[in-house]
Amino acid sequence: MTASLTCRRTASLEAGPVYAWETAEGATGNILIDPEGSVARPCTPQGTAIGDMLLDKGIGNVENPDPDPKLRRAFLIVVSAVFQEWERQGQPPEKVTRTYW
């Protein structure tokens, strides 16, 4: 089974960059990452946090996970891809595309 995702930066706010994401399976959402690139949260397209779920890169676990396993999995994959690309580039990436098997 192959899965893929695409996310692109849609806003650069004082609170951090906002990314819109979509998986090949049709799941979509937005994430806000703090300016230091260490904490990610689901958010609205305008950057307002939604719910309590977050991933702290320093801890490595999803805190207050959403009860929907598909949403949790997509969130974890998207955040991981953005964090990896940010580390590689040394700055918030404009776009991230990944394919998984």
Image (cartoon, rainbow, N blue to C red):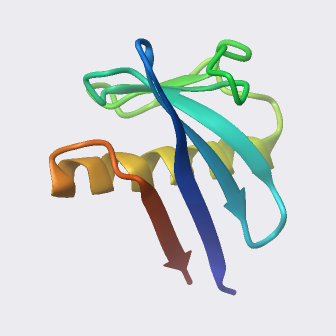
Give above or below for 72 relative to 88: above
Q: Nearer the viewer, residue 52 or 61?
A: 52
Q: Look at 46% across and 59% down and name the residue there.
A: 95
Q: Nearer the viewer, residue 74 or 93?
A: 93
Give above or below for 16 relative to 84: above
Q: Quadrant of residue 91?
A: top left
Q: Nearer the viewer, residue 55 or 94?
A: 94
Q: Nearer the viewer, residue 11 or 62?
A: 11
Which percent across, then down, holds residue 79?
Answer: 48, 44
Which percent across, then down, holds residue 86?
Answer: 27, 48
Q: Quadrant of the C terminus?
A: bottom right
**Residue 97 left/right relative to 89:** right
Q: Look at 84% across and 64% down and name the residue there.
A: 26
Give above or below for 72 relative to 37: below
Total marks drawn?
A: 0
**Residue 21 left/right relative to 13:** right
Which percent across, then down, holds residue 1?
Answer: 69, 87
Q: Look at 30% across and 30% down and name the residue there.
A: 37
**Residue 95 left/right relative to 23:** left
Q: Look at 83% across and 38% down and name the residue there.
A: 68
Which percent across, then down, holds residue 88?
Answer: 18, 57
